[in-house]
Amino acid sequence: MRAPQHHTVENAAPECVLPESARRSARVVAEVPRLALTVEEACQALGVGWDFWSEHVAPFVPLVRRGRRKLVPVDALRAWLEAEAQLALSAQELGAADEVHPGGRRNACKSKGARQPRASGTVS
């Protein structure tokens, strides 16, 4: 019986990263699409940090909990993102950029130097 070969960086060919038995196989395996992400992966997918996730996303996206693992369904994450994009678009279309958000906070995304109406109702 032949001794098993140990793959090291020095003797590995750059084009082959699979074990020899897998390279001999003619069958090509397609990548399986992910149905759920971990919370960390969901944060990365959205490009947000844990604090933003906890405050703005987590209350509106369902989680699947099994033991200590928490999984975010990809479809639920996409649905939340689409709904939030539509809300922002609707507010912009209505000219209500300063409208109160459903969470109760005012929109803090005001351009610097934009004219704001005075409390007395007159504009200078």
Image (spheres, rainbow, N blue to C red):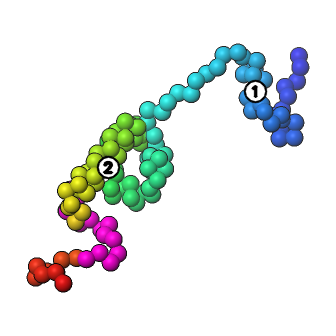
Report which residue position mark 1 lands on: 19
Report which residue position mark 2 lands on: 85
Please give the name of the residue rendered at 33% of the width and 71% of the height, measured from the top-left corner.
111
Please give the name of the residue rendered at 23% of the width and 52% of the height, measured from the top-left corner.
90
Q: Position of residue 105 (x, y in %)?
A: 23, 64
The disc, 1 or 2, on the residue closer to the chain's N-terminal end is 1
Q: How far apart are the alpha carbons under marks 1 and 2?
A: 45 Å
Q: Does the stretch in magenta take in 77? A: no
Q: Which of 92 and 108 is in front in this view?
A: 92
Q: Which of 62 and 98 is in front in this view?
A: 98
Q: Where is residue 67 in the image (x, y as percent from the top left)?
A: 42, 39
Helix, strand or loop at label 2? It is helix
| Residue 104 seen anywhere in this rendered image of the structure | no
Please give the name of the residue rendered at 28% of the width and 54% of the height, measured from the top-left corner.
88
Q: Nearer the viewer, residue 94 or 77?
A: 94
Q: Position of residue 108 (x, y in %)?
A: 30, 68
Helix, strand or loop at label 1? It is loop
Give the extent of the magenta segment.
Answer: 99-115
Look at the image and tell me in which quarter the C terminus lies.
bottom left
Q: Does the stretch in magenta take in 108? A: yes
Three-letter amino acid code of the residue under disc 1:
Pro
Residue 63 sits above or below residue 44 on the image: above
- Checking the image for residue 113, the label placed there is none
Q: Which of marks 1 and 2 is in front?
A: 2
Do the numbered discs 1 and 2 sit on residues whose CB atoms are within 8 Å? no
Three-letter amino acid code of the residue under disc 2:
Ala
Q: Which residue lies furthest to the front in this view?
A: 124
Q: Which of 115 and 107 is in front in this view?
A: 115
Q: Where is residue 26 in the image (x, y as percent from the top left)?
A: 70, 15
Q: In this view, does 38 lie to the left or right of 92?
A: right
Q: Quadrant of residue 110?
A: bottom left
